Amino acid sequence: MSGRNERGSPYAPHTAAETDAMLSAVGVEGVGDLFDIPEQVAFDGEFGIESRSEREAERHVAGLLARNDDLTEFLGRGHYEHYVPSLVDHISARSEFLTSYTQYQPEITQGFLQALFEYQSMLVELTGLEIVNASMYDHATALAEAALLAARVRQTSGDRVLVPEYLLDARRDVLENYTDGAGLSVETYATDDGNVDPDALAETIDDDAVLVYAENPTALGTVEENLDAVGRLADNHDALFCLGSDPVALSVLQEPESVGADVVVGDAAALGLPTAYGMGLGLFACRDDFVRQVPGRLVGASEDDADRRAYTLTLQTREQHIRRERATSNICTNQAWVALRTAIHAAYLGPGGLVDLANDCVTLAADLADRLDAVKGVQAPVHDRHHFREFVAHTDQPAVAIAEDLEAEGFAVHAVGEHHVQVCITDANEHAADALVAAFEEVA
């Protein structure tokens, strides 16, 4: 097969005769008949973009970007910004890292494979679990893959995945989408003051549960105090216990393995990336018992024929590599380069620096909540718990109006209820805390 088709496309290497034969076989006159594109969005042959020089194009784009609102974000709820040292940019942008695809050829990708091995090793230390993959798309897909893993490894029948009331809608939507084809149902159990209600969970769970999910910290910013109870209830009903967290929080909160967690998921991009809404790095750790069921890829250490330490992709249990019926997932493009950035950032901080950063997430949230609580018309925090990075505050005025007024003052917060806003503070925005409190005093 050679030559271009009659439309001159270099990407469809069929001759005109071959194209006509295929169109005849399916009973249409032209390629356009194979597509149903509404007229209002069909390409008419003109892009409508004025021709500009490089300098003119630069000025034009700068003008467009200048129209964006200049807001200081105090947003959280799954997307967290910490200062990323310039070292992370400089090392990760080296050509041997930046241009690398999946590390299929260990002979030429030892450096990248070692970095991913170190990433896995760091998360093994933080979670207490033996296996970490490299890597998943984001928190939501990691949770969904945990549910599918639970359905595969559970010894008895069952189809219920239990999640807390505070689970973010976006994560639940992905979870339901993934589990629908597997015949699993996602059900909610009650919480109390921002934490799991063990009694309500005990009434909800039964032997049909394959997975119980909880978070620490939660999507509300509360530190979960009942993880031991969740672990016991899951174990009593032969269900897997999945815990959601992130590398910063894991450095100071209860170790997942110690409370009975079988799987840990989350977004590891809390280190290594600035906030990138819609982009993340899925953390996935589990017990060694499930190593053959882990989605995605695992980097392992071995020895070459000269007895030197060497790294390779040890397990790749996805349908691209093995028979479909034996695959554990269809995850394709992983987040290896983002995992590299996370590993660089964590190594730069070191154990002490990581703990200091996490402790700041506790003290900054507590201090800001106290200051907002002193503002007339605001009560903070709503939940009588310890908090990590973020908290919910009650506002006497409607929350949407408060959020809009704060936006006009140059600040972004979440309106999460009729009279509830959620505020997130880290090392990246703490410099603006005084101004945020003043803005609350103005609008509340």
Image (cartoon, helix red, strand yellow):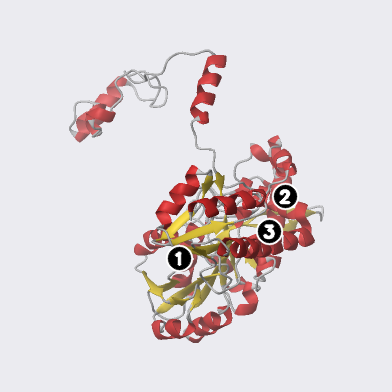
Q: Residue 52 location in percent, x, y?
A: 49, 13
Judging depth in this view, the residue of 384 and 177 nearest the camera is 384
Q: Amino acid at mark 2?
A: Ile
Circle 3 sits on which residue? Answer: 300
- Kindly report the distance in space between the C-alpha atoms of the residues bearing marks 2 and 1: 30 Å
Q: Is residue 40 left or right of residue 129?
A: left
Mark 1 crowdedness (10 Å alpha carbons): few <14, some 14-19, many ≥20: some
- Kindly report the distance in space between the C-alpha atoms of the residues bearing marks 1 and 3: 33 Å
Closest to the camera, between mark 2 and mark 1, is: 1
Closest to the camera, between mark 3 and mark 2, is: 2
Asked whether the residues under the numbered discs 1 and 3 touch, taking CB atoms below 8 Å apart as contact, a structural biologist would say: no
Q: Residue 262 location in percent, x, y?
A: 57, 74
Quarter of the image with the N terminus is top left
Q: Residue 261 location in percent, x, y?
A: 58, 75
Q: What is the quadrant of residue 292 in the picture?
A: bottom right
Circle 1 sits on which residue? Answer: 167
Asked whether the residues under the numbered discs 2 and 1 touch, taking CB atoms below 8 Å apart as contact, a structural biologist would say: no
Mark 3 or mark 2: name the one nearer the start of the chain: 3
Q: Amino acid at mark 1?
A: Leu
Q: Amino acid at mark 3?
A: Gly
Circle 2 sits on which residue? Answer: 344
Name the element at disc 1.
Answer: loop
Q: Is residue 105 above or below residue 138?
A: above
Mark 2 or mark 1: name the one nearer the start of the chain: 1
Name the element at disc 3.
Answer: strand
Q: What is the quadrant of residue 301 in the picture?
A: bottom right
Mark 1 or mark 3: name the one nearer the start of the chain: 1
Q: Is residue 417 left or right of residue 33?
A: right
Q: Is residue 37 left or right of residue 271?
A: left
Q: Is residue 345 above or below residue 295?
A: above
